[in-house]
Amino acid sequence: MELIQLQQLVVIAQEKVLTKAAEKLNISQSALSRSIQRLEDELGVPLFTRTKNSMTLNEAGSVIVEQAKIVLEDSESLLNKAQAIKNQTRHINLVTCAPAPQWKLSAELTVAFPKISVTAEMPDEDEIVGLLLSEKADLAIVRKEIDSEAIITIPFMNEQLFMQIPLTDPLSKKTEIHFADLEGKEIREYTQIGFWYKLHRKMIPNATYIQYTDFMVYQNVVKSQTILTFVTELGNTLHAEREGCVTLPIVDEEATAHYSFAFLKKNERKLQDIVSWAVNEAKAW
């Protein structure tokens, strides 16, 4: 006996006509009739009075339909309880190529899924595929194409790079800038920024970088001084507009990161609810 057979029986009782029930269940009338016949054979009692052109529930069928409803309700309750237990114990190991999308995801995720805990790391982005394949990471935020049939990638969100510029700097008169405009400048920078760290040096090799490894120290410097520093649209909650500075977009193609989620294909069912939720919510972020 299968739950689907009980569901079919309940639908037949509701629709009263086999053809309508089959249409609602999206199966053929003959397949539905065979399924119900197998159920009757297993129960050892006919559930319908059949004539040449119709079949109607008999007394036994009416009793079994009511019991089937109870079984289906119990099965749904069982599934809900199992899901609740699963949610209480779920833990996700997240690796990311940059901090800002992980900050945003973690902040929103704890509200939407309060019983899911997330451990986040930011390795070199070239290590991320290996961490997924070795199952040392469950979920990744990446910006590069992944050439592996074992891994699924789903577009997540974008991050646009900006520059906060003192009003005393001639660049502040512009409406947008390029990386090349920053050559020779002194730039204050927090170092734990993932792939952006290498990208900045590739695109602006002749800048002077004043680096901060302690985020609190970096924040205090940003708040108290009018300096050149990178910010992003995802990090604007951490880097508010500062008096004496203007925030301008960097419009080079490399200044926009296109992030995707990546995870093992075999873990798709486990992660689909989180990924689908995050992709949808990211439209509003």
Image: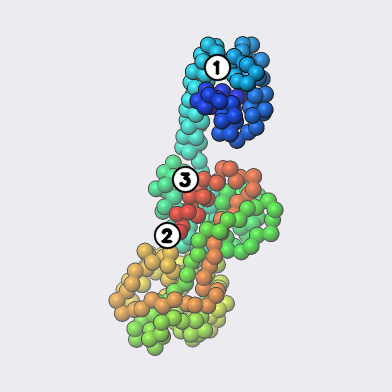
Classify mark 2: residues with Cα within 10 Å, few (<14), some (14-19) or many (20+): few
The image shows residue 249 at horizontal and vertical percentages of 44, 76
Q: Is residue 237 above or below residue 248?
A: above
Q: Residue at x 49, y 18 (%)?
A: 66
Kind of residue at disc 1: Leu
N-terminal-most mark, 2 or 3: 3
What residue would you read off at disc 1?
57
What residue would you read off at disc 3?
117
Q: Residue at x 67, y 27 (%)?
A: 30
Residue 220, picture quadrant = bottom left
Is 212 left or right of 254, judged from the image as shown? left
**Residue 100's mark?**
none
Is disc 1 in contact with disc 2, using a CB cutoff of under 8 Å? no
Q: Nearer the viewer, residue 104 or 279?
A: 279
The image shows residue 98 at horizontal and vertical percentages of 51, 63
N-terminal-most mark, 1 or 3: 1
The residues bearing labels 1 and 3 have C-alpha atoms spaced at a distance of: 50 Å
Q: Nearer the viewer, residue 155 or 183?
A: 155
What residue would you read off at disc 2?
285
Is 218 left or right of 124, judged from the image as shown? left
